[in-house]
Image: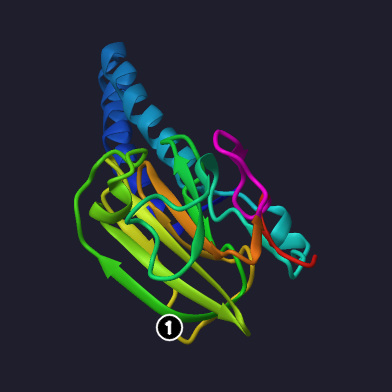
């Protein structure tokens, strides 16, 4: 199991007071000090859980050319018609995924192609399951193009998420399922695909980033 590099400071900070409490407890013989280390160790363990970066099927086997994959773990909130005032300009279908604080938060590219645009928009920190969060919250938006196929996806923070990490730039080419960033502490991801795609998930369904097919180009 890998830990994303953004998580190491969050693991290390709780370990410092845990180490101090343990050392003082041993040197003084005070059991209460040793017990005081456990909450800090538990917090560090949670940080390891949050920033875990497991390999997925797409890391071992290239996905089919027609498949659009879930960019993150979580539960589908929207599948099909886009929410009003949420989709970018154009005629799109929308798949939105809510990530809880125990889901893997490493994000993956839902499709392959060249990054034609990558923008960051500061904003609010509404709960990620609220519709308004899609256009009011802090977010990044990435446009991908592969020939005549185009996909747009967003990293959107939630009430607890306070930072987006986006590790792609315009001109870079991504593979389907490739790691491209993460969001810290509860959030959502929105994917927009053209009408020529068939959405293959439904509201309430649990998906796995880099594995679950959320849409498929017609003709496959």
- Determine the residue positioned at 36% across, 32% down: 43
Quarter of the image holding residue 219?
Answer: bottom right
x then y, percent, for residue 165: 37, 62
Q: Percent x, y for residue 90?
A: 44, 70
Say which element carries label 1: loop
Which residues are the magenta region?
199-211
The residue shown at (55%, 79%) is 145
Q: Nearer the viewer, residue 91 or 156?
A: 91
Residue visible at 46% across and 47% down in the picture = 51
Residue positioned 68% across, 52% down in the render: 211
Q: Nearer the viewer, residue 57 or 78?
A: 78
Residue 61 sits in quarter? bottom right
- Residue 47 appears anywhere in the view: yes
**Residue tagged 1:** 170
The x, y position of residue 192, in whole percent, is: 50, 61
**Nearer-the-camera pick, 191 or 88:** 88
Q: Main secondary structure of the magenta part?
A: loop
In this picture, residue 50 sits left or right of residue 13:
right
> Residue 210 in magenta?
yes
- Residue at far top of view: 31
Magenta residue check for 31: no
**Where does the C terminus fall, quadrant-wise?**
bottom right
- For disc 1, the neighbor class at 10 Å (few under 14, some 14 to 19, many from 20) is some
Q: Is residue 8 above or below residue 126?
A: below
Image check: 27 left or right of 194? left
Q: Is residue 71 above or below residue 161?
A: below
């Amino acid at each position: 199991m890998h830990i994303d590099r953004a998580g190491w400071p969050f693991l290390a900070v709780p370990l410092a007071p845990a180490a101090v409490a343990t050392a003082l407890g041993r040197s003084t013989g005070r059991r209460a000090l040793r017990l005081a280390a456990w909450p800090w160790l538990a917090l560090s363990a949670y940080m390891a859980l949050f920033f875990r970066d497991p390999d997925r099927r797409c890391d071992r086997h290239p996905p089919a050319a027609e498949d659009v994959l879930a960019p993150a773990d979580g539960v589908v909130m929207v599948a099909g018609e886009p929410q009003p005032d949420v989709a970018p300009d154009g005629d799109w279908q929308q798949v939105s995924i809510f990530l809880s604080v125990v889901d893997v938060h490493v994000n993956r590219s839902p499709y392959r192609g060249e990054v034609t645009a990558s923008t960051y928009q500061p904003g609010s920190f509404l709960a990620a399951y609220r519709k308004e969060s899609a256009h009011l919250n802090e977010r990044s938006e990435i446009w991908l193009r592969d020939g005549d196929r185009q996909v747009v996806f967003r990293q959107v923070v939630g009430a607890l998420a306070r930072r987006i990490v986006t590790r792609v730039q315009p001109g870079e080419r991504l593979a389907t399922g490739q790691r491209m960033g993460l969001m810290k502490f509860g959030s959502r991801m929105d994917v927009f695909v053209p009408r020529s795609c068939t959405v293959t998930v439904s509201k309430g369904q649990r998906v796995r980033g880099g594995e679950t097919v959320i849409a498929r180009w017609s003709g496959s």
